[in-house]
Image: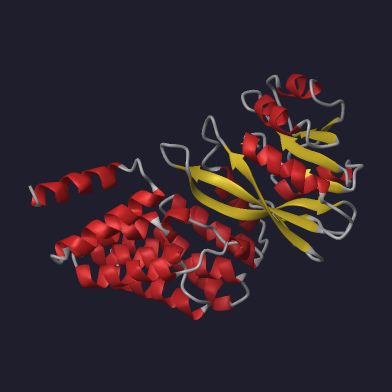
Amino acid sequence: MSTISLCMIVRDEEEVLGRCLESVADLVDEIIIVDTGSKDRTREIAWHFTEKIFDFPWMDDFAAARNFSFSKAGCDYCMWLDADDVLMPEDQRKFQELKKGLGPGADVVMLRYNTGFDEQGEVTFSYYRERIVRNQAGMIWKGAVHEVIETRGNVLYADCGITHRKLRPSDPDRNLRIFEKQLAKDEVLEPRQQFYYGRELYYHRRYQEALAVLEDFLEKGQGWLENNIEACRQCAYCQYALGNEDSALGALLSSFAYDVPRAETCCDIGQHFLDRERWEQSAYWYARALECQRRDDRGGFVLPDAYGYLPCIQLCVCLSRLGRQEEAQAYNERAARFKPDSPAVAYNRSYFASLYS
């Protein structure tokens, strides 16, 4: 059975580090902790799990810190986690099975990264990340922010997830600050970094700037497929914020030039027409969303609700407004199969009951 080094970079993580390491300590063969300047009890907590704790001066470069952590690994594979990540009990079991079968044939193992949740704790946002990488295979981290490993060789997608559970928000300006520091030095952002820079500008409500960066990213034509599709959606959100509704719809539709429609985009278009009470058009696009195949292995951001619950509950609304109550009720019950405890489902049931009372 192959061995795995867990390699982490941390700073002031006393609230969450113990939770993270407790969830994974029995699953890995070595734990490497790289501290980038903690002033709290982070190191003390780490000592309960490993003696391999190293210092690395922070230089506004996540890739540099992660590469340093990987350089200290002595096992067959390197695995990374953030301090506010955790393996839930079911994923711990799946990880054990994965490790038992992890032989020399795999170069990279992709695991789901669950980062968004509803009030019941169900996953609402996830995507695959390169999580376990063959040690000393020449694959390195790149990117000062939103760092990534450019994978190669035999890539395995595994049915195991890492859950990202923050207890407190991180510095909301950190990533934008790092990007703008790079640009102030006349550094050129590579395509993936440009994409994420545009997203950071959007999050900071600098919509016109974000739109310019994302449109330039798309025009250059050097981006990864999934980033291109997501950039179209981000451009649409910028256009909505700027009051350009027709341009927003055009941006969403332009994503179809890159690949078959994603359910997320179809739901965005459905929402566009629903907001304008154009029920027939809205229903059409939500129905298209239900036809889309969910493919987590593409590596893009995935909104699980877009592949079931969301289009069903919105089709219920649209068809009801069109007077097609039986069809609307059927879609409400279909939505209930995805989320039995949904308040919207319960409300709709009461509404339909009142029609026939």
- Percent x, y of residue 11: 69, 31
Instruction: State whether residue 144 is above or below residue 295.
Output: above
Q: Nearer the viewer, residue 42 or 261?
A: 261
Q: Residue at x 69, y 31 (%)?
A: 23
Q: Residue at x 49, y 80 (%)?
A: 257
Instruction: State whether residue 278 is above or below residue 108.
Output: below
- Percent x, y of residue 60: 69, 44
274 vs 192, left or right, is left
Return the residue found at the far front.
357
> Which quarter of the picture shows residue 86?
top right
350 vs 157, left or right, is left
Q: Residue at x 67, y 56 (%)?
A: 185
Q: Residue at x 68, y 61 (%)?
A: 187
303 vs 236, left or right, is right
> Which quarter of the picture shows residue 139?
bottom right
Q: Nearer the viewer, residue 68 or 70?
A: 70
195 vs 135, left or right, is left
- Percent x, y of residue 151: 76, 62
Q: Nearer the viewer, residue 278 or 245?
A: 278
Marker count (numbered):
0
- Percent x, y of residue 234: 45, 62
Display colour scheme:
secondary structure
Residue 66 shows in this picture? no
